[in-house]
Amino acid sequence: MKKFRKALAMLLCVCLLASVTLAVAETASGSQTLDAAATDEVTQAVATTAPSFSDTDVVATVNGESITGADVTTYYKSLVSYYGEPDSSSLELYYAVAMEEAITMKLVKLTAAAQSLDKYTQEEKDAIYAESDADWQSALDSYVSSNGNLTDSSTADDKTAAYAAAEAYYATLGYDKDKLRQNYLDNDIYKKVEDYVCKDLAVTDEEVQAKYDENVAKDKALYENDLDSYEYQMMLYNYQQVTDKPWYHPAGYRYVKHILLPVDATLLKSYTDLEASLEEQMSESDTSSTVSAVSDDGSNTDTAGATDTTQPEATTAPDATAAPDATPEVTAVPVTQADVDNAKAAILTSVQDKTTEIYDKIAKGEDFDALITEYGVDASGNPTDSGMTNGSYPNGYEVALASTNYAPEFVQAAFSITDVGGVSAPYISQYGVHIVKYLGDVPSGPVSLTDELKASIRSDLLSTKTSAAMDAWQAAADIQYTGLITPYAQLQQASEADTTDTTADTTTDAATDATAATDAPAATYAPAATDAPAATDAPAN
């Protein structure tokens, strides 16, 4: 079924509501974006006119059962409702994908009927419908919240009209309450068929260990001597762009926690502005000092030279050729290190009472986590760094000198401490004042194969086996095409035959496979958008 899964990658993007993914939730995230390059790659070598067929025309058969033009049109409209009308470069692909989905769902229903998997009591149907209705109402609420312009003074008639508008909007996309109910029922049937096909699948402990060893070896090669790559991968993980941390931890990291004291906004801005200006001046001075003089014959008459740390002149000298009454151009007074030091001192003075209390309590052995909770709050009582209080980092943040995911002052503070258990002096960043505790070194080497990690590996392996079993199940079906719609496989073959850049072709296939993360029926088409995931808490990064 791999060829179908590639085609369905596009159709599965129509999933708009996270809660509707049901049984395929574990892999749905990989199917929510369409690789445009893959689309172009598939269609570039084929005709771009719409296929000609009627609702009653048979476009394909599955085990002798007909797939009609009307079946295809249903799924085609789902594509159009999400992406809009296709242009000439994607028109045939739309129809090909719609036909493949119609074939898949026909095969699902045939298998379900043969195994009596489509039999439901009214109580079972009601439970499915209750979930569907709840999501339908959530979709309406979401639309009204964004577009209904309701206020506390809105009347009952206003609310009725707003919800009627929401239903009308979703109707233009081909959705209504009853259709969504049917989609949910279809999705449940699909899951039953998948369970039936895959009922004998299992993952052994030896397979889990082998996969762990494979992942560790791969990540060791990637990250053992490349902290920058490790840092980048961790950034993706922190912002939920990938689901797994690296399997191998390079050396050079330590666990730290910090108290982030809030600072008066005016004082902090003054300090950061002055510091930025001084750095800019020094950068300009460095550039100027390294400009080499060139002799008349073109030879270099100067080396890079030492950095010139002198401050630039406060004003520009008047032009000797200017008229006597001309006013010389005046530039901004340069920032000095003393200016920055004074602004820094003003910040430290503003929090001195708190820092004195904190260091006194640390000296008395008070719990650092308790001090984070007590002092790491803003004027409203909210945590200044929720990553320190929400339980996400029980061992603290993992920081190396090479870390780029944190404020540089935070990293400096973390490595200003010599001994485990020590606490830094106050360090100022754009986020406030950091008091950092060095908790211990992060062990280098493979991540621990915990029971939780074993369960995660087992789930991933089972998912892979499930996909293979479903591929084999569909490959065993007798599928015939009548030629009224060009099959997806034919579009792909035509494209590959015309492709001269094999590297681009390989990249496109990989992107398409990654997008086609699951084979799910049309029940994933729900009329509501999901909120983007919030970034994970990270300390002043």
Image (cartoon, grey):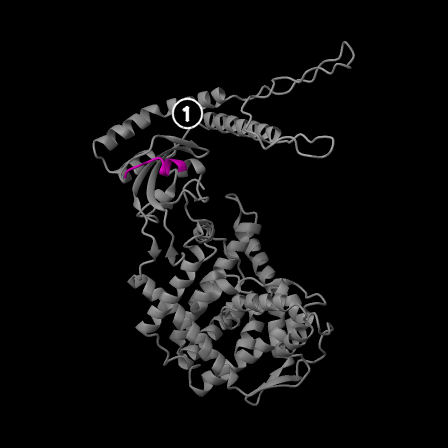
Give the overall secondary structure of the magenta segment: loop
Image location (x, y in percent) of residue 238: 43, 51
> In the image, is residue 68 above or below residue 28?
below
Q: How many marks?
A: 1
Q: Type of residue at label 1?
A: Ile
Extreme bottom residue here? 64
What residue sits right under mark 1 in the picture? 347
Q: Which of the 4 image quadrants contains residue 499?
A: bottom right
User: Which residue range is magenta in the image?
Assistant: 412-419
The stretch drawn in magenta includes residue 98: no
Q: Is residue 54 left or right of residue 420?
A: right
Q: Is residue 34 left or right of residue 443?
A: right
- Work out whether residue 538 can be spotted: yes
In the displayed structure, 99 sits above or below 479; it is above
Residue placed most toward the observer, 279 or 154: 279
- Is residue 172 in view from this perspective? no
Residue 178: x, y in percent? Answer: 52, 70
What is the x, y in percent for residue 49? 74, 73
Q: Nearer the viewer, residue 401 or 518?
A: 401
**Residue at the limit of the structure toward the left, as seen here:** 364
Q: At x 58% / y 62%, what residue is drawn?
A: 170
Identity of the residue drawn at 57% across and 54% down = 161
